[in-house]
Image (cartoon, coloured by chain):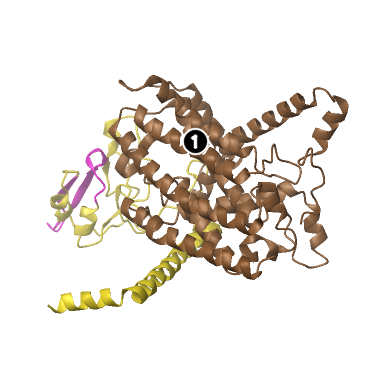
């Protein structure tokens, strides 16, 4: 009932109110359009905002984005040590069976990491292993030129100081 | 009113034309015609190549990209390469298409732009023809491009083409009304329908251009011209006729090779023509901007008029590109609402106000 009343009210005052609404609509519309145009012209006039990189030409000083996900690599400090304990959580987190954590025992009989096998050929670079690692031992690398001629070259052992290829 | 117009026999004359007339008095008519046609052909074929490159670069900069960079200096030859590619591609005709109409359709918009180009006043004495009813000619000829689009959609035997063409036809016919009404406004205050005379009526300082000369109304009329000509050009935000996400390319879906290139080129030359008319009507055409300052005015007036024409026209073209890469596309009903409920009443009020101003002697 209340709804219909207000509707009728609006209809009764229609000529003036309609005119006001019409003008208001035009003015607010133009203001919002100008806002949008201000945003785009800001991008147009500032060359620093260009994110495109001409890749093969600038290979030396290529800037890879902070959140870029290349292949998995293990963090090694200056002495060549890593923080991986061989717990195997990353192996369980991996949906593709990309990672195999092979453990051995040290002299005191404690379980330590033997070989951290990573198969790039199966990896989808989903980042789940990095997220699941409780020790922050692995990260997604920045390297993206990963093409090789043989499939065997895509299997890495990550826990050597340079992450050298098998 | 026009101290500059002297000749009555050849109102539009320039050095080259006069030289041909004195050297070959008998065949001057044919030689001059040939020269003008070849100049226009050159312009019509080079403009879209440049405009497509410009559109891509401007779009790229608006989106924080670089755009074409590899072919030529900063990709300048990119659109020529694309044009060459399109020329060498096979022209496919869909099964069940109306052959004659299918191949006629791309020619119409291309020739329409060519014909309108003939009466654009590029400079004071650089215009192919200056008919007394130039504005009517422009309106009539630009109707050909609607026809071309409608024929293309009908002849393609494809539901998306037909839908796109029908949308585009409805849109262009609707917005032509407000476009014509704005032209009528200028014709009313100028007292002439010849494009050259319209430009000459804006002599003086920048404030004598129609965008500022009509107190308050000029800017509104210019904005409305921009809106309705963007819609007339089928450019974003009014590009519902080729809305890629809905219609897979609209009326041009079934076209390939050179016939697609003709649609594409016509679209861009049309943009130039429309911007040229905007600068003729509102921005003083080929007249140099004069600010009433003694030290800078002779310098600006020294620059030839056709350069000013191109500067103004490319400014308007930049505005079109700016609109295109900023605004989201309108829905079909929003488009019709904009024309019939917003622009048309505003146009009529504007026309009435201008008539009132004219009657009160507040203009000129």
Q: Is residue B71 visible?
A: no
Residue B274: where, in percent of width, then height? 56, 47
Give A150 or B91, whichever is nearer the viewer: B91
Q: Residue at x 34, y 22 (%)?
A: B97
Chain for colour brown? B
Which colour represents chain A? yellow
Q: Quadrant of the C terminus of chain B?
A: bottom right
Q: Quadrant of the N terminus of chain B?
A: bottom right
Residue B341: where, in percent of width, then height? 38, 60
- Residue ID for mark 1: B144
Work out whether B264 lies above or below B332.
above
Q: Judge whether residue A120 is colored magenta.
A: yes
The region drawn magenta spans A99-126
Please tell me in which quadrant of the rendered image residue B270 appears: top right
Q: Is residue B246 visible?
A: yes
Q: Residue furthest right?
A: B22
Q: Is residue B91 left or right of residue B305?
A: left
Please tell me in which quadrant of the rendered image residue B18 appears: top right
Q: Residue at x 37, y 50 (%)?
A: A142
Chain of the residue where label 1 is placed in the rendered structure:
B
Work out whether A135 lies above or below B46.
below
Q: Is residue B332 left or right of residue B362?
A: left
Q: Judge whether residue B173 is colored magenta.
A: no
């Amino acid at each position: 009932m209340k709804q219909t009343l207000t509707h009728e009210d609006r209809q009764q005052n229609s000529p003036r109110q309609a005119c006001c609404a019409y003008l208001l609509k035009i003015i607010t519309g133009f203001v919002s359009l100008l806002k949008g145009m201000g945003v785009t012209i800001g991008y147009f006039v500032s060359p620093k905002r260009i994110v495109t990189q001409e890749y093969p030409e600038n290979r030396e000083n290529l800037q890879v984005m902070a959140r870029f996900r290349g292949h998995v690599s293990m963090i090694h400090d200056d002495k060549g040590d890593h923080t991986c304990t061989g717990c195997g959580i990353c192996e369980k987190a991996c949906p593709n069976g990309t990672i195999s954590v092979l453990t051995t025992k040290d002299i005191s009989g404690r379980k330590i990491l033997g070989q951290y096998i990573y198969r790039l050929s199966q990896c989808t670079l989903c980042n789940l292993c990095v997220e699941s690692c409780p020790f922050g031992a692995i990260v997604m690398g920045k390297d993206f030129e990963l093409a090789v001629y043989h499939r065997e070259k895509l299997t890495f052992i990550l826990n050597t100081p340079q992450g050298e290829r098998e | 009113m026009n101290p500059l117009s002297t000749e009555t026999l050849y109102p539009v004359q320039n050095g080259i034309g006069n030289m041909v007339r004195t050297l070959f008095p008998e065949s001057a008519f044919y030689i001059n015609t040939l020269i003008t046609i070849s100049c226009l052909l050159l312009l019509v074929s080079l403009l879209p190549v440049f405009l497509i490159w410009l559109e891509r670069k401007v779009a790229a900069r608006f989106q924080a990209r670089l755009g074409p960079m590899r072919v030529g200096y900063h990709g300048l030859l990119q659109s020529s390469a694309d044009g060459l590619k399109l020329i060498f591609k096979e022209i496919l005709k869909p099964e069940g298409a109306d052959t004659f109409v299918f191949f006629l359709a791309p020619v119409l918009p291309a020739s329409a732009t060519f014909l309108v180009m003939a009466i654009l006043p590029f400079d004071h004495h650089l215009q192919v023809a200056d008919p007394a009813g130039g504005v009517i000619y422009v309106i009539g000829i630009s109707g050909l491009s609607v026809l071309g689009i409608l024929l293309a959609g009908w002849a393609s035997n494809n539901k998306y083409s037909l839908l796109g063409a029908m949308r585009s036809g409805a849109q262009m016919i609707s917005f032509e009304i407000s476009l014509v009404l704005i032209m009528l406004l200028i014709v009313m205050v100028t007292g002439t329908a010849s494009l050259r005379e319209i430009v000459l009526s804006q002599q003086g300082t920048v404030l004598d251009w129609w965008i500022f000369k009509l107190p308050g109304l000029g800017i509104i009329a210019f904005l409305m011209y921009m809106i309705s000509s963007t819609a007339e050009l089928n450019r974003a935000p009014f590009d519902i006729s080729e809305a890629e996400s809905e219609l897979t390319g609209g009326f041009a879906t079934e076209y390939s090779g050179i016939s697609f290139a003709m649609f594409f080129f016509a679209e861009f030359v049309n943009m130039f023509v429309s911007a040229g008319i905007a600068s003729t009507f509102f921005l003083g055409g080929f007249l140099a901007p004069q600010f009433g300052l003694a030290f800078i005015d002779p310098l600006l007036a020294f620059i030839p008029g056709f350069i000013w024409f191109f500067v103004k026209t490319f400014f308007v073209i930049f505005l079109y590109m700016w609109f295109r890469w900023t605004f989201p596309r309108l829905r079909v009903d929003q488009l019709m609402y904009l024309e019939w409920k917003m622009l048309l009443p505003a146009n009529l009020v504007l026309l009435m106000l201008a008539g009132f101003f004219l009657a009160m002697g507040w203009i000129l």
